[in-house]
Amino acid sequence: MALLTKDGLDRVIQLLVNEGLVDANEVATVQQEVIQTKQPLLATLSSKKLVNNEMIAHATATVMGVPYVNLKDVEMDQNVLKLLSYEVAERSMAVPLGEANGQMVVAMLDVGNVQAVDYLSTLTGKPVRAVMSSSDGIQAVLNQYKGDFTGVQQAVKVTNQEVAQKAASSNVKTITQDSPISKALTSILEFAVKSKASDVHIEPLENALVIRCRIDGVLRKVMELPKAIEPALVSRIKILSNLKIDEHRIPQDGQFAVMVSDKEVDLRIAISPVVWGEQVVIRLLDKSGTSMEIEAMGMTGRALRAVMQGISRPNGMILTSGPTGSGKSTTLYALIKKIKSERINIVTLEDPVEYKMDGVNQIQVNVDAGLTFASGLRSILRQDPDVVMVGEIRDSETANLAVQASLTGHLVFSTLHTNSAAGILPRLLDMGIEPFLLASTLNTVIGQRLVRRVAQKRTAMQSTEMQTEEINNIVGGLLPKSQDEVPEVSEDLGYAGLPLANQNSYTLVKGVEDQESPGGYSGRAGLYEAIDVDEDIQKLIISHATSAEVMRVAKEKGTVTMRQDGMLKALSGITTMEEVNRVASDLA
């Protein structure tokens, strides 16, 4: 915020009080407090949520006699953002708003900083007119610098010059930290983090190199680079991952961490030889962006109650299933967080350790050193654990050890790759687990998928005849039959404001597509089904029942399927029917 004299600060406070934005008594209390804490008065008022940053910025601008602009919800034109590079804008906390009358208009946090204004004027070669905005507003604009690939463009230019000067050599060059390739990789990773991408794909074609990012579960092409940049870019990634840079014939896996936009992001690297070179897939694990709260992830109602009942037991197994990238590990972390306590010893065995949690003893699988899931699980059971989490049950040996651990008084969490919750049961039987052991150890089985959430900017619409029929067929039996039933059914299913069943049309929502919300979506939510393994399900397991039979009985006992959960989320405005059908059309 702009630096104010004591007189200026008093005038800002008086203006906020006069406008009724803050109570004078509350201000007086905070003024006494900051005498002790030595903290800035305005910042303290903001941290206590007595006023927000926009109020403070507007009042400050009024006192200083400068224009004010609220940028929190403004979508900027990328051509305007190019007037100042991201690095300069972030360093100066100043963002371009456009050009007018031969001047460049810039929104700044500190409009009184004459040196910063002169610097921007010298840098751009144009007179600068500064207006005031809040830190939140400027940060909102900085977050829109998604397409700033200056580093990539520089790397392409330098690489093309090198190729023109001499033929490609088989010798791998040493790449320094400040090299164009390093800046190119940084630009790509910054884009991925700002876009909240989960993966970056670097894919070689015959005459080009394609960069794609998986955003909210969907791959999007970001850019296409010249083929000549591929060897240096892949080598740089290998160096950072401590991989062999001269090995091009076999797959290699590695990892490293980077700081991007003041966030620590763990990267998992998978490099594989393909026809036209080496493909690199980078999994981004942004530790600051995951709530680890099972309710916030989308589990609610009957599924949540079944899971909470399962994890409240002192022993047994809680297993979650789904395809790759469906959030199984994140669900396990959220459940571990629910039961974490100083009174119990929680030990995990993971490949890799994705999120580090205080109070949990996490072990990294190392196959090269002989530390597999099976051998690690044997070791864990000698460490006096109360709760054991095995990252994945991949083979019969690990499955048998997990069952034995649950039989001997441990609560065991793990994941499997199956299409549904009921599919876990025949999968474990196929691994050689005795049915009577499985029946006596399983507490809860969970199936899950991920759908994209509808963006905040949205429009309402009525369902088509086909959509209405689909809703009635899938969740007609779950929805309330009369207005009197709405509160009870909403509480039971975990979704407020559900419509009445068997209508001629239903109100659905669709997101408005913009730069922050590709396709009209922003973020993801889970579709869940949870089966409580009670006496009836145990009998089915012992009789080697199929997954379809298990699911039929579970539905009769009240289990909400993933498809039904998805339809309820669509009716609640969380996602769309198109999303539900995209990820769960194969489910009943």
Image (cartoon, helix red, strand yellow):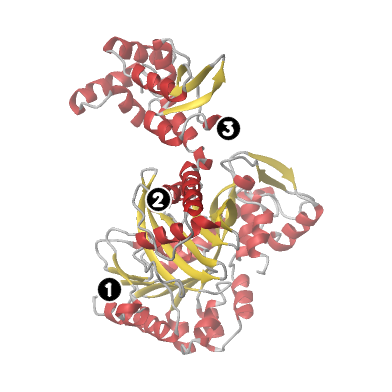
Q: How far across and how far down the image is residue 575, in percent?
A: 62, 51
Q: Which residue lies furthest to the left in this view?
A: 36
- Label 2 Cα crowd, 10 Å radius (few <14 / some 14-19 / many 20+): many
Q: Residue at x 49, y 66 (%)?
A: 306
Q: Name the quarter where the N terminus is drawn.
A: top left
Query: Picture quarter containing residue 580?
Result: bottom right
Q: Residue at x 59, y 71 (%)?
A: 557
Quick one: label 3 or label 1, which is nearer the N terminus? Answer: 3
Left or right of 43 in this view: 284: right
Above or below 369: residue 126: above
- Label 1 Cα crowd, 10 Å radius (few <14 / some 14-19 / many 20+): some
The residue tagged 2 is 182
The residue tagged 1 is 385
Left or right of 224 in this view: 407: left
Query: Picture quarter containing residue 78?
Result: top right
Tell whether label 1 touches label 2 (CB within 8 Å). no
The residue tagged 3 is 79
